[in-house]
C-alpha cells in the first residue's frame, strides 16, 4: 500500500447580495463569497488538495476561470472531478483536516453540519472529516475567507484491467472511467464535467 498527501488553499472576498455556501452547506448570512463559481472556498481547497495528492494539477487546470461555462457553477462539480482523478490514479481518501479562517460567520456552531455535508459529498464517514474554525487575529483580512486543507490518500487494489488506465498514459473512454470508478465508489456521470486530459505523469504515481 502506498500513501499520498495533498495540500489545498483558497481565499475569497465576502460580497453582499450573493448566497453563502461553504463546504456545500448553504449558510444564512448577509454576505456570500465572490467568485466565478459559487465561491465555495472549502470545496475548492479540498479539490486542490485531492488533485495535488495525485499530481494532477489544480482546479484551474480543469476549470479555468476564464471559461464562462463555469460562471456560477456548483463547486461539487469540481470536487467530483477531483474524486475521479484520484480513483483513476488508484487512490482513495483516508481523512482530511480543514481550517477555515474568517471573522464571520462563526464556523464552530455549524462545523458539525458542515462536516456531515462534506463527508456525504466525499462518500466518507464523518469521523474522517475535520473542520476547524479560526478567527484571523492580527491579520488584516476582515472581508476575506481563507481555507487550508490537508488530505491523506491510500492506494486501492484495482483489478489489473483498471490499473492499466494508470500505467498507460492514455485517455480513457467513459466506459473505462465508469469501470474504474465502480471499483472504488458509486459510478458518476462524467459527461457534464468538462473533463480534460490528465496533466500529471502517470508513471510517477504507480
Ligand atoms: Mg476558489
Image (tube, rainbow, N blue to C red):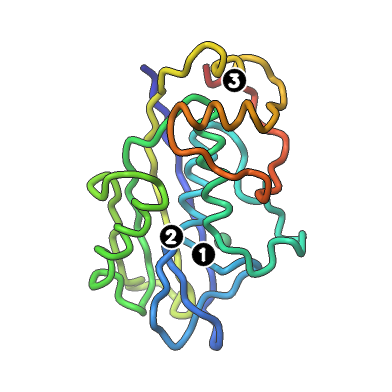
For marks 1 and 2, the one nearer the N-term is: 1
Secondary structure, mark 2, is strand
Labels 3 and 1 touching (C-beta < 8 A): no
State how far apart marks 1 and 2 are (Cα).
6 Å
State how far apart marks 3 and 2 are (Cα).
31 Å
Coordinates of residue 45 in the picture (x, y in percent):
48, 53
The residue that mark 2 highlights is 147
At a point 30% along the width and 76% down the height, the residue shown is: 106
Callout 1: CB less than 8 Å from ligand 1? yes
Q: Give left or right: position of 168 versus 20.
A: right
For marks 3 and 2, the one nearer the N-term is: 2
| Label drawn at residue 166 | 3
Indicate which label's residue lies in the foreground, 3 or 1: 3
At a point 57% along the width and 52% down the height, the residue shown is: 78
Labels 3 and 2 touching (C-beta < 8 A): no
At a point 28% along the width and 65% down the height, the residue shown is: 113
Indicate which label's residue lies in the foreground, 3 or 2: 3
State how far apart marks 3 and 1 are (Cα).
32 Å
Quick one: quadrant of the N terminus? top left
For disc 2, the neighbor class at 10 Å (few under 14, some 14 to 19, many from 20) is: many
The residue that mark 1 highlights is 11
Q: Quadrant of ligand 1?
A: bottom right
Amino acid at each position: 500500500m502506498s500513501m499520498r498527501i495533498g495540500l489545498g488553499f483558497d481565499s475569497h472576498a465576502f460580497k453582499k447580495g450573493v448566497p453563502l455556501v461553504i463546504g456545500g452547506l448553504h449558510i444564512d448570512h448577509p454576505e456570500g463569497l465572490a467568485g466565478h463559481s459559487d465561491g465555495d472556498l472549502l470545496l475548492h481547497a479540498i479539490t486542490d488538495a485531492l488533485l495535488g495528492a495525485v499530481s494532477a494539477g489544480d482546479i484551474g487546470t480543469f476549470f479555468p476561470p476564464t471559461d464562462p461555462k463555469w460562471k456560477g457553477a456548483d463547486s461539487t462539480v469540481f470536487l467530483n472531478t477531483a474524486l475521479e482523478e484520484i480513483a483513476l490514479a488508484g487512490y482513495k481518501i483516508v481523512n482530511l483536516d480543514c481550517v477555515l479562517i474568517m471573522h464571520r460567520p462563526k464556523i464552530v456552531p455549524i462545523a458539525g453540519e458542515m462536516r456531515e455535508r462534506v463527508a456525504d459529498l466525499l462518500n466518507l464517514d464523518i469521523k474522517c472529516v475535520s473542520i476547524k474554525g479560526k478567527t484571523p487575529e492580527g491579520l488584516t483580512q476582515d472581508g476575506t475567507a481563507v481555507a487550508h486543507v490537508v488530505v491523506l490518500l491510500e492506494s486501492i487494489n484495482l483489478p489489473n484491467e483498471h490499473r492499466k488506465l494508470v500505467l498507460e498514459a492514455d485517455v480513457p473512454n467513459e466506459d473505462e472511467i465508469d469501470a474504474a470508478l465502480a471499483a472504488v465508489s458509486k459510478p458518476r456521470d462524467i459527461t457534464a464535467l468538462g473533463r480534460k486530459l490528465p496533466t500529471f505523469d502517470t508513471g510517477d504515481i504507480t
